[in-house]
Image (cartoon, rainbow, N blue to C red):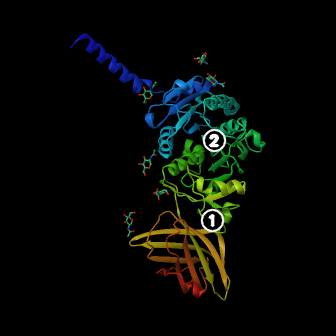
Amino acid sequence: MGLWKFLGLVGFFTLCRAGQDNKCDNFSDLNFHETFIGTNLYVRLLLYTRANLDCGQELPHHNFTKELLFDVKKPTTFVIHGYRPTGAPPIWINHIVHLLAAQVDMNILVVDWNRGAANLNYFIAVTNTRRTAINITGFIERMRDEGASLESIHLIGVSLGAHVAGFIGAMLGGKIGRITGLDPAGPMFAGVPPDERLDPTDAQFVDVLHTDMNSFGLKGTHGHIDFYANGGLDQPGCPKTIFSGKSYFVCDHQRAIFLYLCALNHTCNITAYPCSSYSDFLNGQCLQCEAFKPASCPVLGYDMTPWKNTLLKLGQTRVYFSTSADPPYRKTSYRVDIVTWNQYLRWGVVTLRLHSGKNVTETRIDHKLLRFEQYTATRMLAQFDEDLYPVQKISLRIITGNVIGPRYKLRLIRIRITPLDQPDRPLMCRYDLIMEENAEITFKPLPCDESRL
Ligand SMILES: *[C@@H]1O[C@H](CO)[C@@H](O)[C@H](O)[C@H]1NC(C)=O
Ligand SMILES: *[C@@H]1O[C@H](CO)[C@@H](O)[C@H](O)[C@H]1NC(C)=O
Ligand SMILES: *[C@@H]1O[C@H](CO)[C@@H](O)[C@H](O)[C@H]1NC(C)=O
Ligand SMILES: *[C@@H]1O[C@H](CO)[C@@H](O)[C@H](O)[C@H]1NC(C)=O
Ligand SMILES: *[C@@H]1O[C@H](CO)[C@@H](O)[C@H](O)[C@H]1NC(C)=O
Ligand SMILES: *[C@@H]1O[C@H](CO)[C@@H](O)[C@H](O)[C@H]1NC(C)=O
């Protein structure tokens, strides 16, 4: 081998190495000692694009135009993490980068303010949210000077990061295209005026997801649309006692991220219904989506275009949904309308089972006592963990708690079951059913005949 060729080969391998693992910049990994003594704020910006999905590239804060992968003419999404009590990198960075890149061709800038957020003292991390926001605002202003449009910028903030996003948006006069807040942090932000937290004036469109309003999250409405998962308080599958250790503290709060990742991945298409409270939603009082026509009700996730204009007109909208404990989290929802004709008033809760072949899924509607009486129309929301289709049989039980004494008969003039998430599926009805309290009846659903009632 000639000398020139040999040198060329060495050069080639050197270039390859530089282009691969060596040049990847990773999220700061701090140890317990560092979080214990505290770290000084240092903001890093890690760039990911479709061309370097698995190899972050740290951008300089100034003179970034030389960075070939960073194209300010493309949309840019900033991902801003929250408080990091342990100093370890968030486990979801890689997932969110991949999922965002799959939506549109964009620059993804992971804001690494771990030095600043990793501190045993939460209050110091809170103080650093403003300083981080000032730093990133300076960067975005330089992006704008280089030709980026503020409208094409999206800030996704998790917990404290949601307020960082709000501060940035406010400093840029609310001209940023969008802010998504994932369970905005509550401690130190509850009851403060809007300019000290995330609020709808911070961007042209602000969407917020709440999962832990009663401890780490923040109560109230903070966006043009606020999604409340399971009422925004306690999440199914999360431990209810302190004996479960760390996950007792963080599970509800972290669920916001996992729900959002699942929504970005389209593995859980979660429809949310506008309502004034979660209990009204569970009572089946808020299942109308007419306001969003021709779209249906809002679906959690990246693409809000079908609902955005309506939401901007409405001002601030609260929307509710329920989930199951595990991915894909979604439940299958039906509106159930019953008209009863009993001589005597009965109060009770309802269980419904849907059968498809050998498969069965069950729900119990028991968050309040329902009233069954002569000519009383009762509306319920029935949500199942599984989506069985086609439904071949339905079992219904009305539990009145009357265990001694004679069993009263209950007469249903009509039961109508309307699928909510798949409007193309048929309505299911049955007419004139006689049942006994506490006893289950099973029937085949029939097509609904509106002339009968
Ligand atoms: C970044 O992380 C990867 C994978 O863990 C590792 O191989 C690489 O050496 C790290 N890069 C730096 C600069 O630490
Ligand atoms: C940016 O680049 C310009 C010209 O190339 C140089 O004068 C300036 O000092 C640089 N700024 C920083 C912060 O590196
Ligand atoms: C998206 O969901 C699929 C399963 O539907 C899973 O295999 C994949 O890993 C998920 N992607 C991410 C980035 O979470
Ligand atoms: C942001 O922080 C970086 C790192 O400390 C620094 O180089 C940069 O000048 C800061 N930008 C602003 C606008 O303060
Ligand atoms: C969710 O919706 C998207 C777009 O409407 C669709 O492509 C996808 O298949 C749906 N996913 C599931 C699990 O139904
Ligand atoms: C019953 O459920 C299993 C697993 O979820 C599925 O593979 C099967 O197709 C279902 N059968 C019917 C008849 O729905």
In x, y percent, where is residue 217? Answer: 66, 46
Residue 276, picture quadrant: bottom right
Seen as rendered, the residue at the extreme left is 1
Q: What x and y, as percent, mark residue 347?
A: 66, 78
How far across and how far down the image is residue 92, in percent?
51, 40
Q: Amino acid at mark 1?
A: Cys
In the foreground, 232 or 316: 316
Give the farthest residue toward the top. Answer: 3
Q: Write the residue at 56% across / 51% down.
A: 303
* Amino acid found under the numbered disc labelled 2: Glu
Name the disc covering residue 104, or none: none
**Residue 433 placement: quadrant:** bottom right
Label 2 Cα crowd, 10 Å radius (few <14 / some 14-19 / many 20+): some
Q: Secondary structure at mark 1?
A: loop
Disc 1 to disc 2, C-alpha distance: 28 Å
Please state, as top left, top right, bottom left or bottom right, where the N terminus lies in the image.
Answer: top left
In the image, farthest residue toward the front: 147
390 and 104: which is toward the camera: 104
Give left or right: position of 299 versus 343. Answer: left
User: SS at mark 2?
Assistant: helix
For label 1, the residue is 289
Q: Which residue is mark 2?
A: 151
The percent position of residue 45, horizontal first and vertical second, equals 56, 29
Residue 407 seen in the current view: no
- Above or below, 201 relative to 277: above
Residue 451 vs 206, above or below: the answer is: below
Pointer 2 residue Cβ closer than 8 Å to ligand 4? no
Residue at coordinates 53% horizontally, 83% vertically from top-left?
Answer: 430
Q: Is residue 20 left or right of residue 190?
A: left
Category of crowding for the residue at label 1, using alpha-carbon neighbours closer than 10 angstroms: few (below 14), some (14–19), many (at least 20): some
Task: Single out the residue that lies furthest toward the right.
Answer: 193
Q: Earlier in the sequence, mark 1 or mark 2?
A: 2
